[in-house]
Image (cartoon, rainbow, N blue to C red):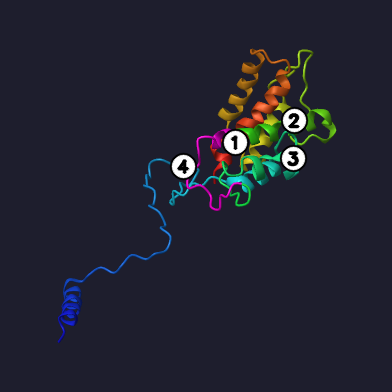
């Protein structure tokens, strides 16, 4: 018998005698189940896959457009001409640009400028929605019925239209109702803006409240 054949035979016999473990399946890892704590009730089931992903340019633009009832091409345009998510910031946001920049595969990680690009897109989209709602209040999608005083501030900060606007932002962008703490935080934001040098604090609050929700981690990851 050839030495190499004998070696294979002995190795096979050794595996049988020692019960060699079978190789692990190559499928996707289901993740580690979360620890069970019977004494701590929770309303939200913790993810067992730990697979948080950045939405990327196409999904980010489409989700912002859907949340604010905007045409996708109006979400963000640099200089009014160049689409932010499909042209200017496409690689920064995790997309590809094979013809312009020679980038054929998405970057493996988000870059230093990715948060800046996300903020730019959210700011532009929110500014569009606020302008439309204020200009044509009868067709307002989110900020309808909010009264402003002579100084441009929210006339009644705790009024139903203000709370409805906050609720609409969370329902449309995050598909859930805001918590009391979140509502209180956005109401406090109005006070902070009014104490600044803003010339239009009411409208600036609308833009800022929209930006806070759209640029949150819950909004830009899935």
Query: Which residue bears the numbered disc 4?
Result: 42
Residue at 75% across, 35% down: 80
Q: CA distance from mark 4 to mark 1?
A: 35 Å
Q: CA distance from mark 2 to mark 1?
A: 20 Å
Look at the picture and state if 111 lies above or below 197: below
Residue at 73% across, 23% down: 203
Q: Does residue 168 show up magenta in the picture?
A: no
Residue at 66% across, 31% down: 123
Query: Which residue bears the numbered disc 1?
Result: 117
Look at the picture and state if 1 lies above or below 198: below
Q: Residues within 10 Å of mark 3 (few under 14, many from 20)?
A: some
Q: CA distance from mark 2 to mark 4?
A: 36 Å
Q: Does residue 110 show up magenta in the picture?
A: yes
Label of residue 74 in the image: 3
Judge depth for marks 4 and 3 and give the one in front.
Answer: 3
Query: Which residue bears the numbered disc 2?
Result: 130
**Earlier-in-chain disc, 2 versus 1:** 1
Secondary structure under badge 3?
Answer: helix
In the visual, does 20 lie left or right of 28? left
Q: CA distance from mark 4 to mark 3?
A: 40 Å
Between 142 and 122, the one lying in front of the other is 122
């Amino acid at each position: 018998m050839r030495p190499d054949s004998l070696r294979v035979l002995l190795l096979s016999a050794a595996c049988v005698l020692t019960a060699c473990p079978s190789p692990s399946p190559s499928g996707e890892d289901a993740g580690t189940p979360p620890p069970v704590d019977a004494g701590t009730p929770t309303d939200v089931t913790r993810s067992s896959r730990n697979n948080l992903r950045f939405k990327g340019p196409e999904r980010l633009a489409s989700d912002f457009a859907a949340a604010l009832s905007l045409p996708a091409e109006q979400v963000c345009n640099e200089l009014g001409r160049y689409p932010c998510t499909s042209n200017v910031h496409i690689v920064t946001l995790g997309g590809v640009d094979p013809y312009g920049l020679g980038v054929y595969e998405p970057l493996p990680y988000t870059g230093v400028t990715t948060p800046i690009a996300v903020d730019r897109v959210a700011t532009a989209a929110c500014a569009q929605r606020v302008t439309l709602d204020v200009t044509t209040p009868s067709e307002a999608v989110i900020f309808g019925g909010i009264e402003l005083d002579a100084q441009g501030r929210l006339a009644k900060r705790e009024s139903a239209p203000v709370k409805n606007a906050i609720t609409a932002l969370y329902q449309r962008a995050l598909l859930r109702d805001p918590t009391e703490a979140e509502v209180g935080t956005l109401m406090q934001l109005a006070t902070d803006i009014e104490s600044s040098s803003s010339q239009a604090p009411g409208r600036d609050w609308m833009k800022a409240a929209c930006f806070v929700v759209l640029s949150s981690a819950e909004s830009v990851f899935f």
